[in-house]
Amino acid sequence: MAGYPDRHRSIENGRRLAGAGVAALEIGIPFSDPLADGPVIQKAGQAALEGGLTVGGAIEIAAAISGRAALVFMSYINPILAYGPDRFAADASSAGVAALIVPDLPVEEAEALKPVFRQAGLDTVFLVAPTSTDERIQRICAASTGFVYCVTLTGITGVRADLPAGLDALLGRVRARTELPVAAGFGISRPEHIAALKGHADAAVVGSALVAADDPLPLVEELLAACG
């Protein structure tokens, strides 16, 4: 989360995780009504907002980390609209951001914004849910660029003990409909989760467990080791 626990440490943590060898860093832009986020991410976002973090500040943080790993912004649509989509896309791209995840932007409502992001060089990543029909998965895969984000469970983000039953089948349905890399996220926090995803997903997205850690580096190193 950009600006959490403060600006300096969010930059420092981003640089340290990039140095550990992560393929990409997802940088959250805090928002006051984060419907998809669990308590850990919500608390971090609220703390960042109370610390004065703005969209412009999140872009500055991305710029301070860029060049070390691929950067992906995760933002709800309202902060982007308030900042101005054209300005946001241009500034994010200039800061080194490669892709954008907007969890509350359905494919049906993205047609006007996708060209704005594409012109700035930003990939647009859409989310497949466990409840998505095959027809909807096809539409999401066709609309996505960069990669497809497969949500492992129905509900909000947060640490879970086990990955849900049926996840392999869901990932298989997605992979059958796209040649893009498929990332799995929500609830992933343990080496055994990474091991279970091998051969089914191209990437694992780990959020809440890292945000909750006083020092996220040891967990990242453990998870990277599980990637083999």
Image (spheres, rainbow, N blue to C red):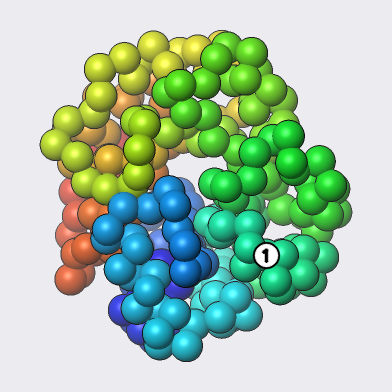
Is residue 226 visible in this depiction of the protein?
Answer: yes
Q: Residue at x 62, y 20 (%)?
A: 136
**Residue topped by disc 1:** 80
- Pinpoint residue 50: horizontal percent, then vertical percent: 40, 85
Q: In front here: 13 or 172?
A: 172
Q: Residue at x 77, y 70 (%)?
A: 84
Q: Is residue 98 above or below residue 164?
A: below
| Mark 1: few/some/many CA within 10 Å (<14, 14-19, 20+) | some
Compared across the picture, whether 79 is left or right of 117 comes to left
Q: How many marks?
A: 1
Q: Position of residue 32 (x, y in %)?
A: 47, 69
- The three-letter amino acid code for the residue at tag 1 is Ile
Q: Image quarter for residue 170? A: top left
Residue occupying the point 14% across, 36% down: 161
Determine whether 49 is above or below 161 in the image.
below
The x and y percentages for residue 204 are: 37, 39
Q: Quadrant of the C terminus?
A: top left
Q: Quadrant of residue 162?
A: top left
* Quadrant the N terminus occupies: bottom left
Q: Position of residue 140 (x, y in %)?
A: 64, 28
| Residue at screen point 81% across, 41% down | 111
Between 50 and 200, the one lying in front of the other is: 50
* Label 1 element class: helix
Let me know if residue 14 appears in the view.
no
Q: Nearer the viewer, residue 213 or 153?
A: 153
